[in-house]
Image (tube, helix red, strand yellow):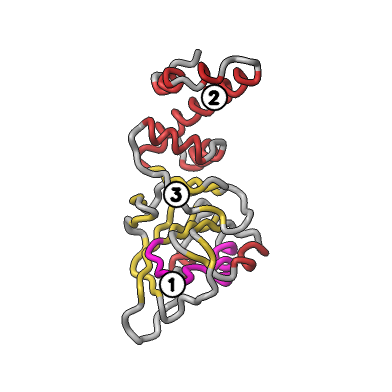
Amino acid sequence: MTAATLLDRLATLDTNTVSDTLDFLNLPGATFGLRPLWNCPKIVGRASTIQLGPKTGSQPTVHLISPVIAEIQSDDRILVIAGDVDGISCWGDILANAAQYKQIRGSVIDGLSRDIDGSESIGYPLFGRGVTMISARNRVVQLSSGQAISVAGVTVHEDDYVIADNCGTVFVPAAHIEEVIALGERIAHRQDGMVQAVRAGRSVADVMHDKEFNAIKEGNKQ
């Protein structure tokens, strides 16, 4: 199955369902605190990983993240950025405009953004921990890209799958994406049925019983 098809199917799910799916499969990936920094739409894509860190020397450097944006050639990418410094921005509106020009789907920052109005004004989706006005220039540098990084306690590799919406951000290991989507679709179908059962008057205690959720994992579609 192509990556594009997998992304289309992943986009029909939400982060709650994908988080539940990872729980069923005993896989890491769900995070806490990486939420939309403006009222932006859900994004689904593949990770381009970037590791930042404090600047230690005095020599001028290329602005962080800009080399990664310049190299991207596909339209399925989400920038996933780790290594923030307390109170310092990892993102701004000039980067947002550059990323949008390259058809990048959005950014997930384990840290803060500045110029949030600039990202919102062009409709560039941005997820992170919060907003600041303090510039990264001469404070934070890019240490690496395309390598495994730790984001909100989850190890994220280049090309892993990303889904982020109003509830937060979930990462799916590329090696497990097909089984995650297949089970996620089954969970979503089952949960839709549970909602309808409650609305039809069935006891919520019965509908929400553990055995009902165990039946999802076992593939019981009754």
| Label 2: how many Cα within 10 Å (few below 14, some 14–19, many 20+) | few
Mark nearer the viewer, 1 or 2: 2
- State the residue at coordinates (57%, 66%): 96
| Label 3: how many Cα within 10 Å (few below 14, some 14–19, many 20+) | few
Comes first in the chain, label 2 or label 3: 3
- State the residue at coordinates (44%, 15%): 220
Residue beneath label 3, please?
A: 32
The correct choice, above or below, for 197 with respect to 177 in the image is above
| Label 1: how many Cα within 10 Å (few below 14, some 14–19, many 20+) | many
- Label 1 vs label 2: CA separation? 42 Å
Residue 163, position as x, y percentages in the image: 50, 45
**Marks 2 and 3 close (CB-CB < 8 Å):** no
Magenta range: 82-101
Residue 189 badge? 2
Residue beneath label 1, please?
A: 64
Residue 170, position as x, y percentages in the image: 45, 45
- State the residue at coordinates (35%, 86%): 58
Image quadrant where residue 102 sits: bottom right
In the structure shown, which secondary structural element does the residue marked by tag 2 occupy?
helix
In the structure shown, which secondary structural element does the residue marked by tag 3 occupy?
loop
- Label 1 vs label 3: CA separation? 25 Å
The residue furthest right is: 121
Residue 160 badge? none
- Determine whether, in the image, residue 25 is placed left or right of residue 162: left
Q: Is residue 98 visible?
A: yes
Residue 128, position as x, y percentages in the image: 50, 58
